[in-house]
Image (cartoon, rainbow, N blue to C red):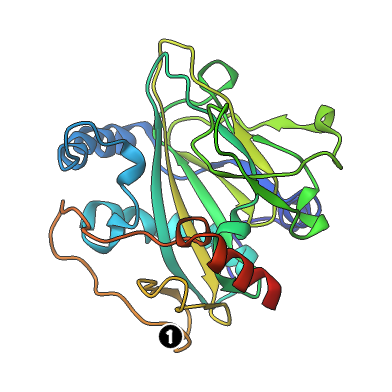
Amino acid sequence: MSKALTESQIKHFRERGFLTGLPVFDATEMARINAELPELLNLLNVGESTKEIREWHETSLYLFELCMEPRILDYVESLLGPNFYLWASNFFIKEPHTHETVGWHQDAYYWPLKPIESLTVWLAFDDVDEANGAMTVIPGSHRQNIVNHARKEGGTTSVLHLEADVSGFDLSTAERIPLKCGSISIHDDKLLHASPANPSDRRRAGFTIRYSPNHVTCDLSINPHFRIYPARGEVCTRNPHGTVPTQRFERLHREHLSIEESGSEAENKFWQKM
């Protein structure tokens, strides 16, 4: 097993549900990565949000290489073990003076995956802090399993329609997750987290990457587009595989289908079976 994380760091992740400030790319590397980002953004249609850059690692080698960066995979292996795969990625870019927030949620609630044992890597393209909308987490909340999520139909600035009921948690224990450009945080798929708006003069860009151990299986009746890419160890045969991209920058033209996007029928079907 990878020794990228210390026993103390692994214990912290198991007990608190997250790690932060893990170095990956240096300033020179991030300058190159950020210099290429506009070419990816140019693939968006007029008026589209950067949130549409989702699973584009399937078509853009630029993103696929970030997802398969050995230094990131070393950290993930320390937590998931030697056999795991990549299956999702997403940009979350908050431009200066934007009002959008992300409400409290658990990633796992949105994903039709069993068992619930996945994690998210958050790669900072900018310095991220309290001023420009750093992510906030409730330490240890991942130990409470899945909480109820309800649909928010209006009166919210959150980009999510399903938000968690956090009435049973002490929000005074919540912690901000600052990151330096080029570093990552990692959080458990059951960890409750959110992020505020970005009222600052600085951009807050983050790229999330999702990994699962090989025994995790997707319910293809909810998301038939699910594709995996073996990252470390044995090749997973439980889920359909994607094709490694050949173009440096190319848009993915496909409908996205999380539990939320598949609708309340899919939501009820999945969680009633758990």
Tell whether 20 sits left or right of 23: right
Q: Residue at x 23, y 52 (%)?
A: 62
Q: Residue at x 73, y 31 (%)?
A: 175
Q: Position of residue 43 (x, y in %)?
A: 16, 43
Query: In front here: 240 or 211?
Result: 240
Q: Position of residue 241 (x, y in %)?
A: 34, 80
Q: Position of residue 47 (x, y in %)?
A: 23, 31
Q: Residue at x 45, y 56 (%)?
A: 261
Q: Residue at x 52, y 56 (%)?
A: 260
Query: In front here: 213 or 21?
Result: 213
Looking at the rendered image, the quarter that the N terminus falls into is bottom right
Q: List the single residue furthest toward the bottom.
A: 237
Tell whether 47 sits left or right of 237: left
Residue count near mark 1 (Cα–Cα under 10 Å), binned few <14, some 14–19, many ≥20: some
Q: Is residue 232 above or below residue 21?
A: below
Camera sees residue 79: yes
Looking at the rendered image, the quarter that the C terminus falls into is bottom right
Q: Position of residue 48 (x, y in %)?
A: 26, 36
Q: Is residue 100 above or below residue 124?
A: above
Q: List the single residue furthest toward the top.
A: 201
Q: Is residue 254 above or below residue 47?
A: below
Name the residue that disc number 1 marks. 235
Camera sees residue 274: no
Q: Quadrant of residue 267?
A: bottom right
Which amino acid lies under the numbered mark 1 shown in the image of this protein? Val
* Label 1 element class: loop
Tally of numbered tags: 1
